[in-house]
Amino acid sequence: MDIGTLRGLGTLVVLIATLGVICWAYSGKRKASFEEAANLPFADDVTLDRNDSRSPHA
């Protein structure tokens, strides 16, 4: 097996993995969770008290 064959097989593996990820991402089963994640930047931020121990400014 020469280097050209190995490179060809590597390319084929990457192509199959890419197509698998694309099919997974665009499948209808996960659309609701992706919609929710897409809207997270627009959600209202929760303001923490200055005395709250979880606050980064305490």
Image (cartoon, rainbow, N blue to C red):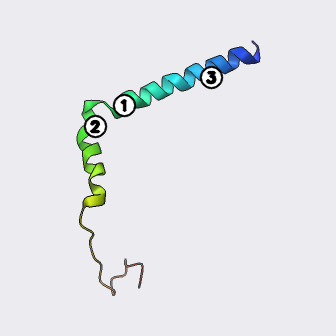
Residue 6: x and y in percent read: 69, 18
Which residue has dot 1 on it? 24
Instruction: Give the camera-side residue of 4 and 33.
Output: 4
Q: Pick out the residue farthest to the bottom.
A: 51
Number of callouts:
3
Which residue has dot 2 on it? 30
- Label 3 SS: helix
Q: Quadrant of residue 47?
A: bottom left
Instruction: Give the camera-side residue of 4 and 24.
Output: 4
Q: Are marks 3 and 1 in contact (CB under 8 Å)?
A: no
Q: Choose the circle earlier in sequence order: 3 or 2.
A: 3
Instruction: Give the camera-side residue of 29 and 15.
Output: 15
- Label 1 SS: helix
CA gap, disc 3 to disc 1?
21 Å
Which residue has dot 3 on it? 10
Q: Choose the circle earlier in sequence order: 1 or 2.
A: 1
Q: Are marks 1 and 2 in contact (CB under 8 Å)?
A: yes
